[in-house]
Image (spheres, rainbow, N blue to C red):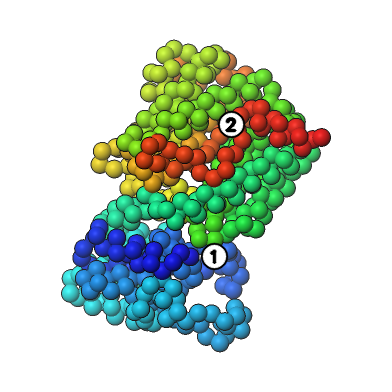
Amino acid sequence: MFNKEIYIDRRNRLRTQIQQGIVVLLSNNEAPMNYPSNTYHYRQDSSFIYFFGLQLPGLVGVIDLDEGKDILFGDDYTIDDIIWMGNQPTITELGAMCGISYVQKTADLSARIENALLKNRKVHFLPPYRSDNQIFLHKLTGISIDDIKSNASVELIKAVVALRNCKQAEEIIEMDKICDTGVKMHLAAMQNCKAGKIERQLAGLIEGMALSEGNGVSFPVILSQNGETLHNHNHEQTLENGRLLLVDAGAESVSGYSSDYTRTFPVSGQFTTKQKEIYEIVLKANMESIAMAKPGLRYFDVHLNATTIIAKGLTELGLMKGNPVDAAKEGAHALFMPHGLGHMLGLDVHDMEDLGENYVGYDEYTKRSSIFGHASLRCGRELQPGFIVTVEPGIYFIPQLIDLWEKENKFTNYINYNKVREYIGFGGIRIEDDILITQEGCRVLGTPLPKKVTEVEDIMTYNTK
């Protein structure tokens, strides 16, 4: 948790974005795994963390814009709680930690909201992504459960996005630290990758590292020899020489900030010629995108350049044909890279996706493309200093997608399907780094994670000696 002045400042900056009404921000509750007292690892709502810093359930933060007052609602722990949990801070003490002097019991919240509604004051809340908070807001406001999300305050959503999109100095420090943890996780995966091991042994190893250095993983570990499945959480295969292992994983700091890296490397420790050729194309797209990213440039344009690099590289190998610039623009590249170049990163691994991706990654000047592949770009808007985005180009050979497009005679002027079929079973390659947009350009967060072919092979070869 940061110094209380940081949370006071964040709430005051919110007041400059919204002038009237009452803002209600809910903490997350505990989520039972199989019975009420056996819960999943607790994760606080990210916007609650941002404005209040407290990572405990059962709290509600209210920012009264008209009265200029911040109020923390919650109940003190009982002796029954303390027996199991140890001594706990009071609500008054919790309020002081985030710079709030007005605290009230949870039972008092309904009366305050009811009074605000009777006076026709606007009650601002964010769209709930958990059903218990959806029900809670229904009871609090009287809005039907089915209409709660559609009644979320767009004004508040835009205000929160405007604040959270541009990271402040204390946030960047946290991001650099947790990116370093992400680097250690990926190095450990490379160093312990050996034929005969089961994928889950590596997945468990790096997840344990995330827990030992922070709050665990920032999302479930993706680690698979079937890298053509973009989000593959199955870890049951035995590692085999000749295959590639794709690892997409990150850590979350105790303060809630996330890292997100992907590396792809050969189980044997040495790339085959075929693997190296595809890898070098992806690496070129990754490195040129990082070199290109800067304030004032739309991230869609960086994405489009990356897809053009991929189309050019695949054309040189004979998998694509025709004009690669046109091929990328029209979406023919998406047979091999059906996702976007990257997304916002911060307190969430897909930062603020709960608020609506189009509010976060797009704006009134940049609208989402309707073309398959380009439409999957989560962030296309003009970059600003303080933005943190991922750069994650990839090339994948997805048998079902290849079958479908060939059957539909799709992009036959750009795709050499006979050649593509020679790569069925290849898997997929993705290379991902996290970058901070600076005043001059950008920089990679954390300690650089090796990604050149010689660097990866040297790490893996060293560990077989």
Q: CA distance from mark 2 to mark 1?
A: 33 Å
> Where is residue 447 drawn, in percent x and y?
57, 43
Farthest residue, direction right: 465
Q: Is residue 420 left or right of residue 166?
A: right
Residue drawn at x 29%, y 64% is 12
| Disc 2, SS | strand
Farthest residue, direction left: 119
Disc 1 marks which amino acid? Answer: Tyr
Q: Which of the image's four quarters has the C terminus?
A: top right
Q: Nearer the viewer, residue 210 or 244?
A: 210
Residue drawn at x 61%, y 35% is 450
Q: Find residue 454 and report its image quarter.
A: top right
Disc 2 marks which amino acid? Answer: Ile
Q: Which mark is residue 143?
A: none
The answer to whether marks 2 and 1 mark residues whose Cβ atoms lie closer than 8 Å is no
Q: Which residue is mark 2?
A: 429
Circle 1: is it few (<14), some (14-19), or many (20+) Cα within 10 Å?
some
| Disc 1, SS | loop
Q: Residue 129, relative to residue 378: is it above or below?
A: below
- N-terminal of the pair, mark 2 or mark 1, is 1
Q: Find residue 159 and report its image quarter.
A: bottom left
Q: Nearer the viewer, residue 440 or 202?
A: 440
Circle 2: is it few (<14), some (14-19), or many (20+) Cα within 10 Å?
many
Residue drawn at x 39%, y 82% is 105
Q: Residue 55, relative to residue 439: is it above or below?
A: below
> Where is residue 332 drawn, in percent x and y?
44, 23
Residue drawn at x 68%, y 26% is 271
Q: Which residue is mark 1?
A: 42
Q: Find residue 277 and report its image quarter.
A: top right
> Where is residue 169 drawn, in percent x and y?
42, 53
> Where is residue 383 drawn, in percent x and y?
35, 39
Numbered disc total: 2
